[in-house]
């Protein structure tokens, strides 16, 4: 299976509500940073908030990676494990190269 051929059940389905809450919190943080810029707040304060947003997104990403590894790779059909492992490692590589 590839990114265009997905299973009907995602690995994060069980934690979907928690994931949505975290993403809503991140949305609020981003709006807060926008407000800080509009209010011409001190640069370091804005950068501190951006760092907090990045940490929150990293936590979301790590949770998704963990769910994918357990549900889609380990718990997935044997015939797609190699492809899904490759996808997982490519996603990890993209996350590590950001910035």
Image (cartoon, helix red, strand yellow):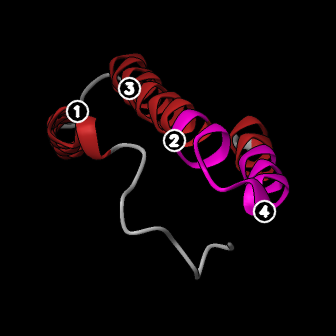
User: On screen, 32 above or below 9?
Assistant: above
Q: Earlier in the sequence, mark 2 or mark 4?
A: 2
Which numbered dot is residue 56?
3
Q: Earlier in the sequence, mark 4 or mark 1?
A: 1
Residue at 38% from the left image edge and 26% from the top image edge: 56
> Is 68 displayed left or right of 90 in the figure?
left
Which-is-in-front pick, marks 3 and 1? 1
Question: Which secondary structure, mark 2?
Answer: helix
Which numbered dot is residue 45?
none
Q: Earlier in the sequence, mark 4 or mark 3?
A: 3
- Magenta region: 70-89
- Callout 3 environment at 10 Å: few (<14), some (14 to 19), or many (20+)? some
Depth check: 61 or 88 in front? 88
Which numbered dot is residue 22?
1
- Per the model, the C-alpha gap separating discs 4 and 1 is 34 Å
> Is 77 displayed left or right of 62 in the figure?
right
- Per the model, the C-alpha gap separating discs 2 and 3 is 23 Å
Q: Which residue is mark 4?
A: 79
Depth check: 7 or 95 in front? 7
Quadrant (top left, top right, bottom left, bottom right) of the C terminus? top right
Q: Which residue is mark 2?
A: 71
User: On screen, 62 above or below 17?
Assistant: above
Query: Residue 95's x, y, as percent?
Result: 68, 41
- Per the model, the C-alpha gap separating discs 4 and 3 is 34 Å
Asked if labels 3 and 2 touch by Cβ distance under 8 angstroms, the answer is: no
Which-is-in-front pick, marks 2 and 4? 4
Which-is-in-front pick, marks 4 and 1? 4
Asked if labels 4 and 2 touch by Cβ distance under 8 angstroms, the answer is: no
């Amino acid at each position: 299976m590839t990114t265009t051929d997905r299973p009907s059940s995602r690995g994060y389905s069980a934690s979907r509500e928690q994931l949505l809450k975290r993403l809503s919190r991140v949305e609020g943080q981003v709006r807060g940073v926008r407000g800080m810029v509009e209010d011409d707040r001190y640069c370091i304060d804005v950068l501190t908030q951006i760092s907090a947003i990045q940490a929150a997104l990293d936590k979301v990403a790590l949770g998704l990676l963990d769910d994918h590894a357990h549900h889609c790779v380990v718990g997935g059909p044997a015939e797609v494990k190699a492809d899904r492992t490759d996808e997982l490692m490519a996603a990890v590589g993209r996350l590590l190269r950001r910035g």
